[in-house]
Amino acid sequence: MGFRFQKRIPIFPGVYLNLSKSGVSLSLGGHGASVNLGSERRTVNFGIPGTGMSYRMPISTGIIGMLLVAITVIALVYFLKPDLIRPVLHAWQPRLFPN
C-alpha cells in the first residue's frame, strides 16, 4: 500500500476543491450524484448515500460545459435569493435518504 493524501475544501454549497497527491480537481454536486473535473480525468458519480455503493463513468467536454453553465446560474441565484433556490435544490433528493 502506498502513501495517500486527500483534502476537500468547500467553496460554495455543493462545490468543492479537491487536493491530492495526484493533483487538483473540482467536485460539483452532493449526496447521490456529483461531477468531478480534474486535469486528466472528468467523471460523473452516482451513488446510494449511506451504502458505500456508487457508479463512476467518464463524461465528455460538451456535457461539462453545459453543467458548468447550469451550476454557475444556480450559484448566482443562490447568492442573490437563497430562499428561492433552496427548495428547488432539495426537491430532487429522495426522501428515503435524509441529510
Image (spheres, grey):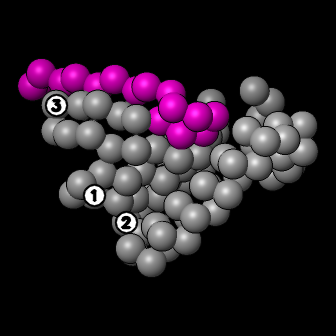
Q: Nearer the viewer, residue 92 or 52?
A: 92
Q: Is residue 91 magenta?
A: no
Q: Tell me whether the residue at label 2 lies in contact with that at label 1, contact meaning CB atoms closer than 8 angstroms.
A: yes
**Magenta-drawn segment:** 1-16
Name the kind of residue labelled 2 in the image: Pro
Give how far apart the Cα atoms at labels 2 and 1 are.
7 Å
- Corner quadrant of residue 57: bottom left
Expressed as whole percent of the image width and height from the top left, the position of residue 91 reads 86, 48
Q: For this view, does 93 lie left or right of residue 35?
A: right
**Residue 41 circle label:** 1
Q: Calculate the distance from the C-alpha at mark 3 to the C-alpha at mark 1.
A: 14 Å
In terms of secondary structure, where does tag 3 sit? loop
- Asked which quadrant contains residue 98, the reply is top right
In this rendering, the count of numbered labels is: 3
Q: Position of residue 21 (x, y in %)?
A: 16, 31
Q: Secondary structure at mark 1?
A: loop
Can you give x and y, in whole percent of width and height, for residue 88 in the image?
85, 50
What residue is shown at x 24% (from left), y 54% (from top)?
39
